[in-house]
Amino acid sequence: MPQTLGAAILGCGGIGTAHAWAVTRVPGVKMVACVDAIPERAQAFASRFGGDAYTDPVRALERSDVDFVLVTTANDLHAPLTIHALEAGKHVLVQKPMALNLRECDAMVAAAERSGKKLMVSFFEFFHPAFVRAKELIDDGVIGRIFMIKAIMAWYMPNTDAWRFNPAVSGGGILMDGHSHHVALFHWLVKEPVQSVFSEGGTLASEARVEDTAVTLLRTPSAIGEISGSMRLKEPCPQNGRYFKESIEIFGTDGTIQIKPEERPSLRVFSDNGRVAEKLNGWISPNLEWIPYEDRGRSMHFNGDEDPWVPEHRYFVDCIREDREPVSNGQFGREVMEMVFAGYESLRQGRSIKLPLDVAAGVGYQGIPR
Ligand SMILES: NC(=O)c1ccc[n+]([C@@H]2O[C@H](COP(=O)([O-])OP(=O)(O)OC[C@H]3O[C@@H](n4cnc5c(N)ncnc54)[C@H](O)[C@@H]3O)[C@@H](O)[C@H]2O)c1
């Protein structure tokens, strides 16, 4: 294992900026290649974060000093670029949603197994201090057994010509984009297999070609998740006034946890079983991990001092160095996508869909329902 790990970023767009910024703050990591189909974007990233600019990912992946790759392109390129990178002997951190269908997910998992390299799907919630603390409290039994999670992620996307609204590129609308975050969160927190998925949604607030709004219900033997989302919500985020909303309520047999990453405090806990160290019998806001000023991101909706991006990249690099399997590895990512695609199947059939989902059914968006 080299002392310094070389990183390549494939996709120098919106979220690529958060990844490139964060990864270059991880000790022992150097950016060596910035790739974008638009040469000016690749060049701008190389000037800002280091390394050489490329328009062809294949050329960047030929470099022996690239140890791992961040795949931050639009969704349709996640699978081909990830598989190519793994076959070139690179570890891969790929943005959600993992891929456009279950066959692609399976091919990505198989490529990771063949190569022996790490494959991780990025879910920022797993590294945000409020979610990390919530998970610790849940695992400590502070709210008892989870029986319900209610979550919403929504924003306003003005331009319905963007790739997100083109099903051939995005694979679908809010289920792929917003729901995939909270399906992953539910799966992370409720450690039971999801048995069935029911989604209701459609193009309710735009002329988009994909569903702009949806609600999805996930059912395990002892818990239910209600995941809502929209790409047409006009509600200003308290951090900067832009239209974005994220809110999660986790209900356990002994209490409730609320997470609102845009607000301060972002985490509130109520527990009546005497297992909260800080204070009992009322809402409390536990102290969170302090993110040093220089590691605080410029994400548009979090509290400035509670940023997930540097912790996420530090974790991925630790997994590489210590040969540990990432929490959201390829198999986890595949399980999340199975639930998302079951949601699309549910939209199509107008009924609840039992898991496991037939691989052939996992084809993502199939037209605006009803
Ligand atoms: N976790 C989050 O909070 C979060 C937020 C936003 C986006 N995302 C995900 O990140 C991904 C990218 O989203 P975005 O908003 O940054 O999109 P974007 O359009 O801003 O960026 C994508 C970039 O990829 C480039 N690109 C296109 N073809 C390429 C190729 N062949 N090789 C290299 N680069 C190429 C584009 O030119 C563009 O610069 C999506 O999958 C999205 O779902 C996640």
Image: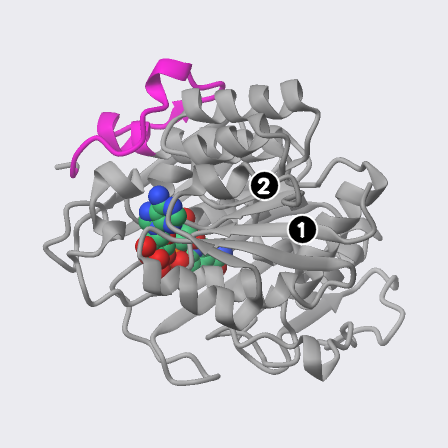
* 28 relative position to 79: left or right: right
Nearer the observer, 60 or 145:
60
Does residue 100 lie above or below 296 as drawn?
above
**Disc 1, ligand 1: is the CB inside 8 Å?**
no
Cβ atoms at labels 1 and 2 below 8 Å apart: yes
* 137 relative position to 367: left or right: right
Residue at 37% in and 49% down:
55
Does residue 266 lie above or below 38 as drawn?
below
Q: Is residue 123 magenta?
A: no
Residue 98 seen in render: no
State the residue position of label 2.
63
Residue 329 seen in render: yes
Q: Which residues are magenta?
A: 344-368
Judge depth for marks 1 and 2 and give the one in front: 2
Q: Is residue 363 magenta?
A: yes
Q: Amino acid at mark 1?
A: Gly
Q: How many marks?
A: 2
State the residue position of label 1.
6
Residue at 67% in and 51% down:
6
* 305 relative position to 232: left or right: right
Residue 323: mark in rendering: none
- Picture coordinates of residue 300, whole percent (x, y): 46, 75
Q: Quadrant of residue 364?
A: top left
Does residue 324 lie above or below 26 as drawn?
above
Q: Quadrant of the C terminus?
A: top left
Q: CA distance from mark 1 to mark 2?
A: 10 Å
Residue at 79% in and 56% down:
136
| Scheme of image coloration | one colour
